[in-house]
Amino acid sequence: MKKYTPFFAVALLLLSLSSFGQVTSPIKINAELRKTTEQLVDETHLITEERKEQLIELGDFLIEQRTTSKATKVLFVCTHNSRRSHISDTWFQYGLVYYGISGYQSFSGGLEATAFNPNAIGALERAGFSVAFDKKIVNPVVSVSPGHYPVWQKQSKVYTHATNPKQGFIAVMVCSDADQSCPVVDGAVGRFALPYDDPRHFDGTPSQDLKYDETVAQIGRDFLFLTSYMKQKLIVAEERTAGEK
């Protein structure tokens, strides 16, 4: 069994550096999101050992697939592209920025298109993300940001949509239905299952906001762990390369 070595302090020192040692554009993280981030990083112990192994396996593959000539693409897939895939996409993009990791692009899609669910959007806002969209549009483009920059545009779409990668990407299935319905994702060089329970079952109940917040926290905790692990691997690889010169 692989073990994860926390390196949060080291990562913070290297936050302003990309994985190639180049200075990245500084970002201003919303105070509430920074608070949420620190809390989730401190809650690594809440991630099961089984899930840690799954995240480490994904992290190793992401590092192996990383190239210097073009970005490695990751596609998060769930059934409706309304909740879990958008939340996963958001936290992965944020984790990359937070830990100063370059060379990756993140996308999301579903087996069908619906809309980015307002309850999921609200939970991301409560976690500290800045969110903006036109509530009058049925399937709006939702702008999500950790502060003022970067701004990620998200809209519900099928995973084969023209804006999503067609070849050489890594597919991450974040719901069991999508995982079972798509045993093979055409064009993917790797396929990983990281299912999360669907909070939609609590829509319209007294527990609605609590369950959505729990889902956002769980996914955030996982993807901060993943990107932290990736950063550690990149630091070790750079130190090894520097030592060989």
Image (tube, helix red, strand yellow):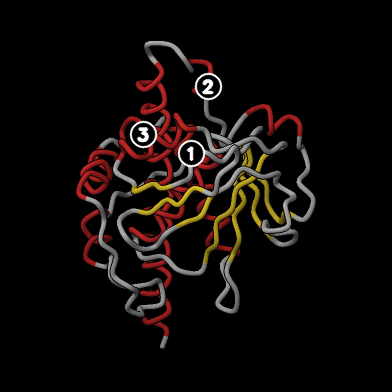
Q: Residues within 10 Å of mark 2 (few under 14, many from 20)?
A: some
Report x, y in % for residue 199.
49, 23
**Residue type at numbered disc 3:** Ala
Q: Nearer the viewer, residue 69 or 239?
A: 69
| Circle 1: element type | loop
In the image, taking residue 125 as reference, residue 163 lies left or right, namely: right
Q: Is residue 210 above or below residue 17?
A: above
Above or below, 239 relative to 108:
below
* In this picture, residue 128 sits left or right of residue 142: left
Between the C-alphas of marks 1 and 3, the distance is 25 Å
Rendered image: mark on residue 200: 2
Q: Which residue is mark 3?
A: 217
Q: Residue at x 32, y 49 (%)?
A: 5
Query: Badge 3: how crowded within 10 Å, few (<14), some, or many (20+)?
Result: many
In this rendering, the label closer to the viewer, 2 or 3: 2
- Which residue is tagged 1? 135
- Secondary structure beneath dot 3 equals helix
In the rendering, which numbered label is found on residue 145?
A: none
| Disc 1 residue type (three-letter) | Lys
Alpha-carbon span between mark 1 and mark 2: 19 Å
Of labels 1 and 3, earlier in sequence is: 1
Position in image of residue 189 (x %, y %)? 71, 56
Q: Between label 1 and label 2, give the one nearer the viewer.
A: 1
* Badge 2 amino acid: Arg
Residue at image position (44%, 39%) is: 52
User: Which label's residue is closer to the chain start, 1 or 2?
Assistant: 1
